[in-house]
Amino acid sequence: MNRRDLLLLFIISLLVLFAIAQFQSLPGYMDADYYFGGGLQLVRGNGFNEPYLWNYLADPSSVPTPSHAYWLPLASILAALSMWLTGESTFAAARLGFILLAALVPPLTSVLAFRVTSNRASSLLSGLLACFPIFYAPFLPVTDNYGIYMLLGISFFLLLSSLPDARKPYIVFFGFGSISALAALARSDGLLWLGLSFFVAIWWTGKQVDTEYEVRNTHSASPISHLLSRAPRLLLSAFCILLAFLLLASPWYARNLQVFGSLMAPGGSRALWLTSYNDTFAFPASQLTLQSWLASGWDAILQARLDALRINLLNAFGAQGGIFLFPFILVGMWSLRRDVRVRFAAFAWILLLVAMTIVFPFAGPRGAFFHSGAALQPMWWVLAPIGLEKTVAAIRHRGWLDDRAFVIFRGALVGISILMTLVVLAMRVLPGWEREDGHYVQVESFLVENGAPPEAIVIARNPPGYHIVTGRVAIAIPTSGIPSVLLVAAKYNARYLVLEPEGASGQLRELYDNPYQFPTFRYLGETDGNRVYEIIR
């Protein structure tokens, strides 16, 4: 690989991302809304506090409330840094850092591929696949963790590539700790990368000591002394990992300890006891306990995890495997099954699958597995061209193809990636990316026309999205229907309720369909399908 190749991949990726961004004037969904909103709070000098509640898992006493009690702060920090550097507090400014980081993914994927294969053509193909990432394409130009996680994954495997020949291996382990810390500050499953780093230390220490043992080949070295000789290096490697991790992550954990009284924010711990996805919005969250989880019954507990496994495996085939790339990834993985980078990638994927199936069976299928899998996506782009070449070589061995086959199939692989990326964008972005956020502008205008004071709090399906487009304090619609809505309104002094046609179910669907039949709600009217109520207390 040369600099011209890498620069070309960067430019192609940048053009693709900016082209997508032209159709995304708002973050477009709650995750990206939340991170952008957190960045706005930081750049406006409000610190890690938020004037919206998207769930009640941390049992906040009021709004504004301490932020990032469930999701982590790194994406918000990057959004704030982008706005601070540009001097503008807009979504267009906030996402610049995300676009630039995402544009680095293809050239660095190509570098990783070259480290694995030493083949320029295969490495360029890997980089081009990363330029047209199919299902990940709509999410890379917005304020979310996808590009961040991809870069962290690439960095992990590049460090792993350099470790066997590193003159100063403990600096490399310091790098592993830094990557783990950034991953843990981006997503809660980032802690898995810390564990993976320790496994790397165990592997490397054993490999180094085994090599020296074979070189000495002396009768005086007993197996026991051979094992004991691993301890100092292993401890030093682990120390470097942990030191780097704590240097970067400890300020955040100290903040959590000061604000919440625990190292980890309380929202994530309560998520362990969900019995359905809707429990994410349960109020009060104190009802989510080990006892309530057990009371749901082992049949329901097991069925939820079986359903999660099925959906996560479909996600692996479709979203992570890109459908048509999936068989080539498997062939490439098998052909390089002895490569330590491939082994660690497979191990990491299994860990993520277990976590998103057994520990978080509701968040995983709803996007968390897709999110967390982004860190491994560059490795799959590395393996797909290898699998293609192995497949074509096996067919040519039978005399069915000529020498042009490799060029033709490589071109076809890129062409199909481009086509599928365009199809995904046409389905996901072009119909109206801003629909989830943009309609709140009309709702807010309707509220103002009906005399809503600026300080009045709104209960809505997407509170961060409502706030970033209107500036109004907003809180989430809780589960359990009208009684929970009234309890939330009483605790947080909320005055208005916005029901969207796709977000109303159960009792709230009855309220939506029969807006005049509930005396505790005064129906104000409808705008763009959204029905607006004043809560009577």
Image (tube, grey):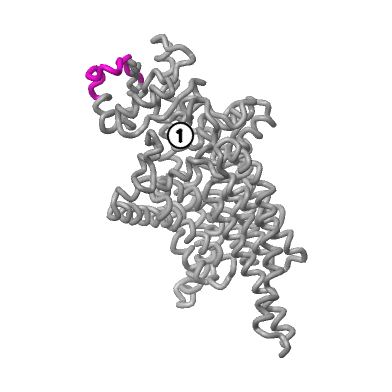
Judged left or right of residue 429, residue 251 is: right
The answer to whether residue 270 is seen in the rendering is yes
User: Is 253 one of the magenta-colored residues?
Assistant: no
According to the picture, the residue beneath numbered tag 1 turns out to be: 59
Specify the amino acid type for callout 1: Asp
The answer to whether residue 405 is seen in the rendering is no
Q: Which of 410 and 114 is in front in this view?
A: 114
Magenta region: 513-527
Q: How crowded is mark 1: few (under 14 residues within 10 Å), some or many (20 or more)?
A: some
The image quadrant of residue 427 is top left
Identify the residue at image location x=40%, y=54%: 312
x%, y% of residue 452? 42, 12
x%, y% of residue 28? 47, 33
Q: Nearer the viewer, residue 216 or 336?
A: 216
User: Is 522 one of the magenta-colored residues?
Assistant: yes
Identify the residue at image location x=59%, y=32%: 48
Q: If the image is split into quadrants, where does the N terminus sit?
A: bottom right
